[in-house]
Amino acid sequence: MLEERGNISLSIDYLSGLSLPANSAILDIGTNHGSLVAELLARGYAGALGVEPCLGALREGLRSAPKLSSRLVASSGELLPFKDRSFEVITCFDVLEHVRAPKKMLAEVRRILKPNGMFVFQTPNLFTNVPWEVFKGRSLTAWKRYHCSLQTLWTLRSLLEGSGFSEIKIEKRSIRSQYNLIRLREHIGPAAPVMLAALEKLPLALATNFWGHARSGAAQPYVTT
């Protein structure tokens, strides 16, 4: 739960900087326990919904927050059970790297976004995540089972452009947080603050994670490949 709380804090901080209209219909893909949906509802986004393919995660979330029962839907990002042009904003934090058919998911995202709707995302960088996962898991290949779609700065932009998105912005964010410090200390001990400071200075192409947003563009037919 510490990991989810830490991630939600970072995600909310990023969304706050985008100044989304209070009446925005927002869908969170890969919502896990629904914590981001709960936070969005608490902040006045009455149209917030979440989808999550793992039934166990949904059950766990509903045990702690039964009021979310009408807000969480069991579904994967590759087949979203919503009508065309249903949402102004779709969020996808720490999800893209787990999706085996990212083009199919992004086609679905565009389908259900309203014209000029916003897709907001965060995903690990292949260049930094693979060495970390190899070190953490003591395996050269285990990471491929759960991070099957890691991107570089260039492949991420190409993926979004090829999926029809425009006004693409990809950026790095500060990783100095108590949450990240605790995570690092679990694996490298007292050297964690030094490592965190070094990672903070990396250029965008080597950043630990990519944060960003893009627009769906004007309404048009969607083709899934």
Image: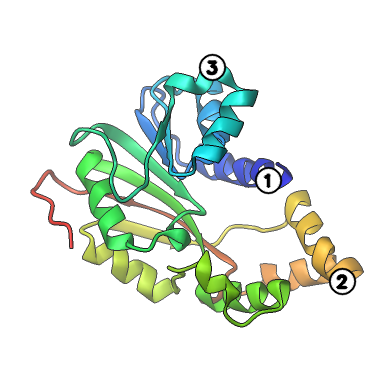
Q: Position of residue 47 (x, y in %)?
A: 38, 23
**Residue under label 3:** 67
Identify whether 97 is placed above or below 203.
above
Residue 125 visible to an observer of this rendering: no
Q: Residues within 10 Å of mark 2 (few under 14, many from 20)?
A: few
The amino acid type of the residue labelled 3 equals Lys
Label 3 and label 2: CA atoms lie apart by 42 Å
The amino acid marked with disc number 2 is: Ala
Find residue 196 and report its image quarter: bottom right
Disc 3 vs disc 1: which is toward the camera?
3
Element class at badge 3: helix
What residue does disc 1 label? 6
User: Residue 36: which disc?
Assistant: none
Left/right placement of residue 187 relative to residue 120 reads right
Residue found farthest to the bottom: 140
Name the residue at 60% across, 41% down: 8
Eyeballing the image, is 224 above or below 159?
Answer: above
Q: x, y (%) of residue 92?
A: 44, 48
User: Disc 2 marks which residue?
Assistant: 191
Position of the N terminus, as image quadrant, is: top right
Residue drawn at 58 percent across, 58 percent down? 173
Q: Position of residue 25 (x, y in %)?
A: 34, 28
Q: Amino acid at mark 1?
A: Gly
